[in-house]
Amino acid sequence: MNNKVNLFILIPESNPKFNWICNLDILIDETNAITYLKNLELYKKSINLENYNGYYDENSFLELVNHFEILDDYFYPNKLKRKLISLYQDFSDWRGNKKQISENIYQIFNQNIENHTLCEISQRKHNVSDENFALLNHIFINNNHIEITINQEHSNTFEILSDESQLINWFTENRIPQRKFQAIQKHDIRKPLFRNGEWRYPLYRSSINPQDILKTAIGLTKKELFGYDSNKKMFIVFKYENVEHENQYHGYHVELDSDEVNSVIKNKLLYK
């Protein structure tokens, strides 16, 4: 069983075959190139706790690297190129394990396309229909979804994720395995109490299910996540349980001024 989702990044191309694909020249400006790197770093940080297989097209990536080398010659000796490579280093080149079939006809907007990331994601989804796939759009296309057809018989529609919010929302619904909340007796108390050398905090009854809060909870590590219960006007601290094959947590409420939730997390939860 694949315990990760599959995320394919789309890269602008130097010689796009279709007018709906962005040209790499969009990054010829220094400011746009720096923004490209900042946004990509932001996207990756927003899903740093998620389990996913990341893929890119080596051919398009090398064109992108060469493009940044030219910018480095003018502005920053190797700085932009090094940053670019570091952001892609935990993604894999799908061409190293290519699944698309040369005899197949792949179509988008009634146009044939071949030897492309869009063909690859379509073929992989066709091969393993129970896995989740999405496209990370980074200055490639203006659509929010795309339908790809194989041999005019089989088609799949893929979401195109174009910003941090879309990425987070997609993983909330599509992460594998989904987070699971399990209440435990330890927190079935009416108020905080000190017992056996530690403070214990209650999980209060709320009109909002802790499971729903857990889906969008954030944190610095997977072992401890935090969510905001708008009904109780309190935070919920979720603790990871090392249960085999389960993404399971228990949790409890704490006050808004609790030191257990750091200021960065508090601000993200209260002002998102």
Image (tube, rainbow, N blue to C red):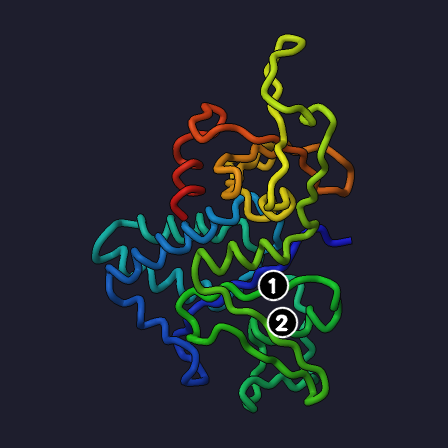
Dot 2 surroundings within 10 Å: few (below 14), some, or many (20 or more)?
A: many
Give residue 169's position: percent from left, percent from top.
Answer: 53, 57
Residues at marks 2 and 1, CA–CA distance in whole angstroms: 8 Å
Q: Residue furthest top?
A: 197
What residue would you read off at disc 2?
120
Kindly indicate whether the residue at mark 1 contacts the one at mark 2 (C-beta within 8 angstroms). yes
Q: Residue 177, percent across and down? A: 70, 49
Give SS at disc 2: helix
Looking at the image, residue 182 lies above or below residue 23: above
The residue positioned 26% from the left and 49% from the top of the image is 77
Which of the numbered marks, if any, corresponds to residue 140?
Answer: none
The amino acid on which the numbered mark 2 sits, given as a three-letter code, is: Glu
Instruction: Please provide percent x and percent y for residue 206.
Output: 60, 40
Q: For the residue carrying disc 1, how many other residues have a C-alpha within 10 Å: few (<14), some (14-19), or many (20+)?
A: some
Task: Kindly state the secondary structure of the residue where label 1 is placed.
Answer: helix
Image position of 112 (left or right of 72): right
Residue at image x 59%, y 37%? 222
Q: Residue at horizontal 58%, vertical 65%?
A: 134
Residue occupying image coordinates x 78% and y 38%: 244
Above or below, comparing residue 90 to residue 236 in the picture = below
Q: In this orientation, which residue lies closer to the viewer: 15 or 37?
A: 37
Q: Out of 214 and 190, give the one closest to the viewer.
A: 190
Closest to the observer, 219 or 256: 256
Quadrant of res 240:
top right
Q: Position of residue 142 (x, y in %)?
A: 42, 75
37 to 195, vertically: above or below: below
Q: Nearer the viewer, residue 224 or 102?
A: 224
Residue labelled with disc 1 = 94
Badge 1 amino acid: Trp
